[in-house]
Image: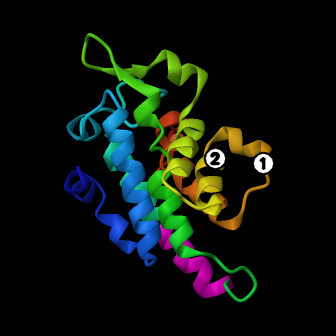
Amino acid sequence: MRETIRQLWPEIDWIDDFQLREQVTETWVRALERSPLTAEDLNRIPFTLLVPDCPITFMEHKRCVVHIAHDSAQAMQEFMGRALPVNIDTVIAGAILADVGKLLEYELGPDGKSRQSERGEALRHPFTGVALALECGVPDAVCHVIATHALEGDLVKRTTEAFIVHHADFMAFLPFKNPRNIKLKP
Ligand SMILES: [Fe+2]
């Protein structure tokens, strides 16, 4: 199972702290063990149920968000780190774990398509994601990123790391959710 996680998430190796790397890996192992979805499903199902016929897979979206968040965190550290320190490990781990709870939120319908399960309706993935991560010893600063990355987080004062992951996630989602409806010359 750990090898499967390594293949899904080469970005886990970007995390400097050995212990955090282990905690992130273990969270994904437990999520896959308890999920009706397989690793293959993650490379096939759309990343969101909110966009009809979404062309981007779960893993394509998740990995893109991790890359955006990582690069943004580095730029902020380089130009503004003197006044606004950013913990890069927390950003990477938070971005990798932000949607891990979707493995407990989704199920496969009889048509093979993903849909929200009854549990998922009651407990969206920020909640199940935090539950899984805490079980694996993931620190509060990273759990905060998971908890606040989506709309629920608008009610919470986000840390800098949580802002970065939240915006990375939404910039890779909103153009699909709300495509432009006016014609602009390129
Ligand atoms: Fe999410």
Inter-mark Cα distance, 1 to 2? 9 Å
Q: Residue furthest top?
A: 110
Q: Secondary structure at mark 2?
A: helix
Residue 22's quadrant in the figure?
Answer: bottom left
The range drawn in magenta is 70-80
Taking the magenta stretch, the answer to whether it contains residue 46 is no
Residue occupied by mark 2: 147
Residue 151's quadrant in the figure?
Answer: top right
Instruction: Name above or below for residue 53 compared with residue 19.
Output: above
Callout 2 environment at 10 Å: few (<14), some (14 to 19), or many (20+)?
many
Residue at x 54%, y 66% (from the top left corner): 91
Q: Under 8 Å from ligand 1: the CB of mark 1?
A: no
Residue occupied by mark 1: 156
Tag 1: residue type? Val
Q: Is residue 32 left or right of residue 66?
A: left
Residue at x 58%, y 86% (from the top left corner): 78
Q: Under 8 Å from ligand 1: the CB of mark 2?
A: no
Residue 19's quadrant in the figure?
Answer: bottom left
